[in-house]
């Protein structure tokens, strides 16, 4: 018996990497899985449906239940069809794991409009569409039946805080995903639905390009810290009955580590006692920044790389 017996999950971007690991782990825990994947490359190019179908076949060969869905997560109607397929195939829908995405990296002064728009589309709009349609299903079911089992799990990144200079599009999208998921957590609380965000450190097609590749390389022997499988147990736990009181949280997960993020806190608070002007700001706020180094001594945390 698994922790998710009888539950129905939709996992986006489930053909490889983290999504594949999540789909397989959810199935091992007893969930029936809709495997969504377009089969695009790390930069969003191409299309190969065989990746998603192979995950479906792997789940079935292990005795589980799964069905493929090849829709675009950022297309309003195709995203909704993921939920519809879950309900039509298995009679219900309980868990959404949004993972699909790709990168098109450029420094801010070199990035083209399409590179910005396409990355926000697949990550941020892709998450929004899935969450929107899942939320509607959960709310309607809750109103009709009084009880609903719903879990929303979103994939962000520490890039939301570290703001990689070569990924202004990706960083912006991931910050937006956290905000969107937290909004869902608040809106759906009265229906008993939870929504959480996790930020994985894992070896995927997207992390094995550029300067981060050496950080995530597979070791020759010993524990494989950045294997995607290390992330998926947290996903399954957050989707389980045991996490019914966990919502609106943000986690970092990798290797043997799980970190629970705390809310942002105020640093310096200044009250001028009267309307601010440039002189009073310079006298008080300027004094606070005396001797500090631009960017290094700022809201931006140190990079993990």
Image: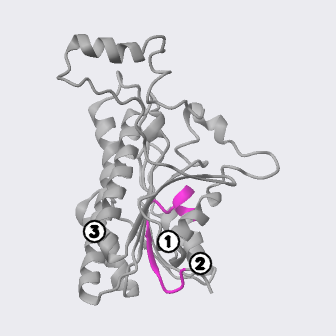
Q: Where is mark 2, residue-wise?
A: 29
Q: Residue at x 39, y 51 (%)?
A: 178
Task: Say few, some or many: other residues with alpha carbon within 10 Å of mark 2 (under 14 / 14 to 19 / 20 or more).
Answer: many
- Horizontal side of 275 relative to 97 (left or right) equals left
Helix, strand or loop under label 1: helix
Task: Say few, some or many: other residues with alpha carbon within 10 Å of mark 1 (under 14 / 14 to 19 / 20 or more).
Answer: many
Q: Where is mark 1, residue-wise?
A: 239
Instruction: Examine the image and state in which quarter residue 196 appears.
Output: bottom left
User: Label 1 to label 2, Cα distance in Å?
Assistant: 10 Å
Sequence-wise first label, 3 or 2: 2
Helix, strand or loop under label 2: loop
Instruction: Examine the image and state in which quarter residue 77 appears.
Output: bottom left
Q: How is the image coloured?
A: one colour
User: Label 1 to label 3, Cα distance in Å?
Assistant: 18 Å
Q: What is the x, y in percent for residue 97? A: 44, 65
Sequence-wise first label, 1 or 3: 3
| Label 1 close to label 2 by CB (< 8 Å) | yes
Task: Say few, some or many: other residues with alpha carbon within 10 Å of mark 3 (under 14 / 14 to 19 / 20 or more).
Answer: some
Q: What is the x, y in percent for residue 218? A: 71, 46
Q: What is the x, y in percent for residue 115? A: 33, 36
Q: Residue at x 44, y 33 (%)?
A: 163
Number of the front mark, 1 or 2: 1
* Residue interval drawn in magenta: 4-21
Q: Residue at x 51, y 71 (%)?
A: 243
Helix, strand or loop under label 3: helix
In this rendering, the answer to whether 37 lies above or below 242 is above
In the rendered picture of this protein, how many numbered marks are placed on residues? 3
In this rendering, the answer to whether 85 lies above or below 122 is below
Q: Where is mark 3, residue-wise?
A: 133
Whether residue 16 appears in this view of the structure is no
């Amino acid at each position: 018996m698994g922790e998710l017996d009888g539950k129905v999950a939709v996992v986006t971007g489930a053909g490889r990497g983290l999504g594949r690991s999540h789909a397989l782990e959810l199935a091992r825990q007893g969930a029936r899985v809709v495997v969504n994947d377009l089969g695009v490359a790390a930069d969003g190019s191409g299309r190969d449906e065989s990746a998603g179908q192979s995950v479906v076949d792997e789940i079935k060969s292990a005795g589980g239940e799964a069905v493929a869905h090849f829709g675009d997560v950022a297309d309003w109607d195709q995203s909704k069809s993921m939920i519809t397929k879950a309900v039509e195939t298995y009679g219900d829908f309980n868990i959404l794991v949004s993972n699909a995405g790709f990168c098109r990296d450029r420094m801010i002064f070199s990035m083209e409009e399409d590179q910005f728009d396409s990355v926000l589309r697949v990550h941020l709009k892709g998450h929004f569409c899935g969450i929107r349609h899942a939320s509607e299903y959960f709310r309607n079911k809750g109103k009709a039946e009084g009880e609903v089992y719903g879990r929303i799990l979103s994939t962000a990144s520490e890039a939301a805080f570290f703001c990689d200079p070569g990924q202004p599009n990706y960083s912006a999208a991931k910050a937006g995903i956290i905000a969107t998921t937290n909004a869902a957590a608040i809106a759906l609380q009265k229906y008993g639905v939870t929504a959480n965000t996790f930020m994985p450190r894992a070896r995927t097609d997207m992390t094995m390009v550029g300067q981060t590749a050496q950080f995530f390389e597979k070791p020759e022997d010993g524990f494989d810290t950045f294997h995607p499988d290390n992330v998926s147990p947290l996903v399954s736990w957050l989707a389980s009955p045991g996490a019914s009181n966990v919502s609106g949280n943000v986690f970092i997960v990798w290797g043997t580590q799980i970190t629970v993020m705390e809310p942002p806190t105020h640093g310096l608070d200044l009250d001028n006692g009267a309307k601010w002007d440039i002189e009073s700001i310079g006298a008080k706020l300027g004094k606070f920044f005396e001797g500090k180094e631009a960017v290094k001594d700022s809201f931006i945390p140190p990079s993990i790389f």
